[in-house]
Image (cartoon, rainbow, N blue to C red):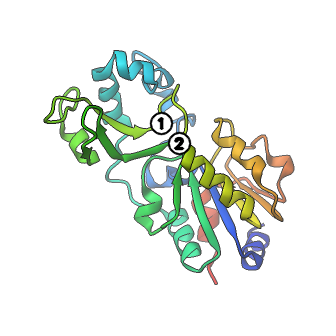
């Protein structure tokens, strides 16, 4: 299977990559639904409640207690998957990385065209004056982080009940429509509307790499049930 994937990559000219939490698990960042993921942690509220716009408004301090504990992996480093994709982009074959992750590891590995569907922990702004704050400010603050103007600081991550950024969605659709190969990896393809972007692909090769089966397995040209980092470690660019 690896040799088949290598051949497809070698013959492709416009590859787009669509990734989820499984891309970053080998960097030590747990996904939401795995055995060790956030959905198996014990808090007073389930993660999908805490990470909602309503909860942020009503229980901001409790939101930040969870957020600091679970959503700020600032010491995490890019793994083999991130590095391979950056090299593939530098070679001219990969046109864009579309990610559901908010950790910024694709950029840390050197990727330039990264479309973050769910935002990023690295961008935080005052809700009152729009001043920018780095994630370290959130990490090192106590209680509800606030700006000098008195406004509450909010991470630019897409919470439950919030819509995705229209410009990011439009750019994602553009790259998917233009691609001759689409590699989907590390995602269960169950989170919408992000998962719906796959249906815009009209290219030649659809590749799925995920530990578990996905609803799209039957429509893919090649399915590999393994860790993303392991698969990409076996490949080369050029």
Instruction: Name the residue carrying label 1.
Output: 158
- Dot 1 and dot 2 residues touching (CB under 8 Å): yes
Q: Which residue is disc 2 drawn over?
A: 165
Percent position of residue 222, x then y? 81, 60
* Residue in the picture at 66% in, 60% down: 175
Residue 146: x %, y % from top left: 20, 32
Q: Is label 1 in a helix, a strand or a loop? A: loop
Label 2: which secondary element: loop
Q: Earlier in the sequence, mark 1 or mark 2?
A: 1
Question: Please, is residue 167 above or below residue 156 in the view?
Answer: below
Residue 198 position (above or below residue 11): above
Q: Residue furthest front?
A: 129
Q: Is residue 188 visible?
A: no
In this rendering, position of residue 4 left or right of residue 75? right
Q: For residue 51, what is the image quadrant?
A: top left
Image point 86% across, 47% down: which residue? 218
| Picture quarter with the C terminus | bottom right
């Amino acid at each position: 299977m690896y040799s088949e994937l290598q051949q497809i990559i070698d013959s492709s000219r416009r590859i787009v990559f669509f990734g989820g939490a499984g891309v970053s698990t080998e960097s030590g960042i747990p996904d939401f639904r795995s055995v060790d993921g956030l959905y198996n942690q014990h808090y007073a509220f389930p993660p999908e409640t805490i990470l909602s716009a309503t909860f942020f408004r009503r229980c901001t301090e409790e939101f930040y207690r969870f957020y600091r504990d679970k959503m700020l992996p600032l010491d995490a480093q890019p793994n083999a998957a991130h590095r391979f994709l950056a090299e593939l982009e530098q070679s001219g074959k990969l046109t864009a990385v579309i990610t559901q992750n908010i950790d910024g590891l694709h950029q840390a590995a050197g990727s330039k065209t990264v479309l973050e569907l769910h935002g990023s922990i690295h961008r935080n702004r005052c809700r009152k004056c729009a001043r920018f704050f780095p994630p370290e400010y959130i990490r090192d603050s106590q209680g509800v982080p606030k700006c000098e103007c008195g406004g509450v600081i909010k991470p630019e991550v897409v919470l439950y009940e919030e819509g995705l950024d229209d410009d990011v969605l439009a750019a994602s659709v553009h790259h998917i429509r233009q691609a001759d190969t689409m590699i989907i990896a590390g995602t269960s393809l169950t989170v919408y509307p992000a998962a719906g972007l796959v249906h815009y692909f009209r290219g030649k090769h659809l590749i799925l790499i995920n530990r578990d089966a996905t609803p799209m397995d039957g429509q893919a040209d090649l399915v590999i049930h393994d860790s993303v980092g392991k698969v990409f470690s076996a490949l080369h660019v050029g």
